[in-house]
Image: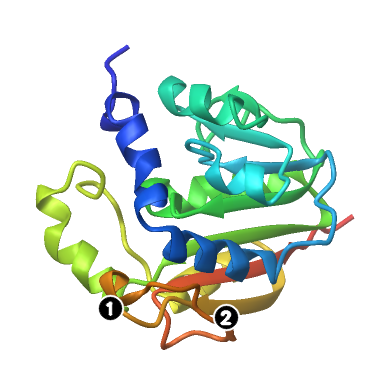
Amino acid sequence: MKKTVYDIRAKNYDSWYDRNPAVYASEIEAIRKLMPVNPGKNSIEIGVGTGRFASELEVNYGIDPSVSMLEIAAGRQVRCIKGVSESLPVKSSSMELSLIVTSFCLMDADLTLEEVHRILTSDGELIIAFVEKNSILGKKYRKKASKSRFYRNVVFRTAEDIISLLKEHRFGDITVMQTLFKPLNLIHHPEETEEGFGRGSFIVIKAKCIKNE
């Protein structure tokens, strides 16, 4: 199988967080605001990458198509599964929490949300964290996307786009948080987290899985 840029550049991708510790801390804190106190054994990060978020947030399982990424995640004590978001090798109604951080833009949104809905229990929670399309950072990434190894094929979305998608795919009780209010090179200390969206570049949305039983 042909290696992707995420296989070839896994260590370089992972080291970004070491080079931007205040940004990473801000993102972790924003997600933590919407996380359950104890995610438990039935929790999974989809598009886990190198496990930076799953390990810090105590999410038990991680799934990703990149073997190189998963090798790093496994070193962070994440229980790794090779696979893709559009066809999750996970039992139906088996997870209480699904987390997607900065990778939703690389996924088929409709197929992924159908699969997440399938694997979650009734009232299970989905948390999606992403860079907002029209934010300071979103505009920067969009501008350089065609020349970037990592952003060439991404689909940037607004908070409204993702909220609409969630409702279409039977998710409700939606809560939104935001952080990263300045350009990244000006963030030297962890930023505050605020409710809602419209100012921050990093948005976190939590929604409950609604099932007709």
Quadrant holding the N terminus: top left
Amino acid carrying label 1: it is Ile
Q: Please report the residue visible at 39 percent of the width from the left and 82 percent of the height from the top.
A: 181
Identify the secondary structure beneath mark 2: loop
* Camera-nearest residue between 192 and 200: 192
Rendered position, 136 above or below 114: below
Quadrant holding the C terminus: bottom right
Task: Check disc 1 and report the residue beneath it.
Answer: 136
Counting from the top left corner in percent of width and height, residue 196 is at 56, 86
- Label 1 neighbourhood size at 10 Å, few (<14), some (14-19), many (20+)? some
Task: Check disc 2 and report the residue beneath it.
Answer: 193
Q: Are marks 1 and 2 in contact (CB under 8 Å)?
A: no
Rendered position, 190 above or below 25: below
User: Please, which residue is most extreme toward the front here?
Assistant: 188
Q: Image check: 123 left or right of 98?
A: right
Counting from the top left corner in percent of width and height, residue 210 is at 78, 62
